[in-house]
Image (cartoon, rainbow, N blue to C red):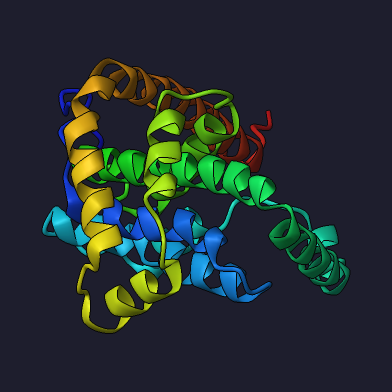
Amino acid sequence: MASEKISPRTAFDWAIYVDATLAGLAILIPIPLLDVFVEWLFKRRIPQAVARRNGRRLDRYTVYYLQNEPFSCTGCLLWPFTLVLLFLKRLYRTILYFLTVKEATDKLSLYWHRAFLIDFMVRRGDLDNDKTAKVAALAMYDVLDKLTTSPLQQLAVQVIGGMHHIGRTVWQWRRQEQEDDDLQNARLEMSNAWERFTVYLEDVADQYVKVFEHFQAAHLAERIAADFSASPTKTD
């Protein structure tokens, strides 16, 4: 059961953020669609990696909720066209590298926020059962969607600036979980700077709790209304 007494983990923990970091940095891979695949590969690892850090394992339904932002079936039908447009966009982006850096900055910050919130959700117990996990995932996406600017973006720019061999970095970690010089430098930069974001991360956690409680109350109200409407009608 979710508990309001659990404080967010604002101290830096590399085990929580390494997959999130590599998911964000994958955009720097200069091969269209390979970057998309690598991003997806590390993005899908985040929930279970964070859960393992807390001595837990999430069921497949919870992982699905956390990995799939709600979208309409229209998106499914248009996916082939989207893939072509994405390829052209990434090809154009490799020509204008500053667009790549901007997108990588946004993605890196986003995945750090995602890993932070999932850790908080696991520790609160919001992912302990299917009912609360679905509400928690919706609350997480709502908070992430409303992020505009973040102090983590400045750190993201610094980390991206230290990346010189992203393909080798990703390959070594994926195959043997070994850090090359670039990944070591990224970890050290994050570790040295993370304490500056304590107050900010606490505020993000507070936003999540408020949204989660609001969604949970609305979900409960809908269930009660559904149960009430399904009840037999009293007759004289």
Question: In x, y percent, where is residue 79?
Answer: 81, 69
Residue 1 image-quadrant placement:
top left
Percent position of residue 117, x then y: 35, 39
- Could you say which is closer to the camera, residue 158 or residue 59? 158
Residue 195 lies, with reference to residue 188, above or below; the image says above
Q: Residue at x 35, y 17 (%)?
A: 203
Question: Does residue 101 sit above or below 73 in this rendering?
Answer: above
In this view, which residue lies farthest toward the left? 55
Q: Image quadrant for the C terminus?
A: top right
Instruction: Give 125 or 117, whichever is nearer the viewer.
Output: 117
Can see residue 9?
no
Q: Viewed as shown, does residue 202 lie left or right of 236?
A: left
The reply to whether residue 140 is visible in this rendering is yes
Task: Report how many numbered discs are placed on residues in the image.
Answer: 0
Task: Give whichever of 129, 223 is nearer the camera.
Answer: 129
Residue 224 falls left or right of residue 70: left
Q: In the picture shown, does residue 121 fall above or below 51?
A: above
Location of residue 136 (image quadrant)? top left
Residue lying furthest bottom: 175
Give the residue drawn at x 11%, y 59%: 55
Relative to 36, 10 lies left or right: left
Q: Position of residue 135 (x, y in %)?
A: 47, 41
Q: Is residue 121 above or below residue 64?
A: above
- The location of residue 41, given as percent across then percent down, is 46, 72
Please tell me which residue is depicted at 24% across the width and 21% down the height of the picture: 196
Q: Residue at x 50, y 72 (%)?
A: 38
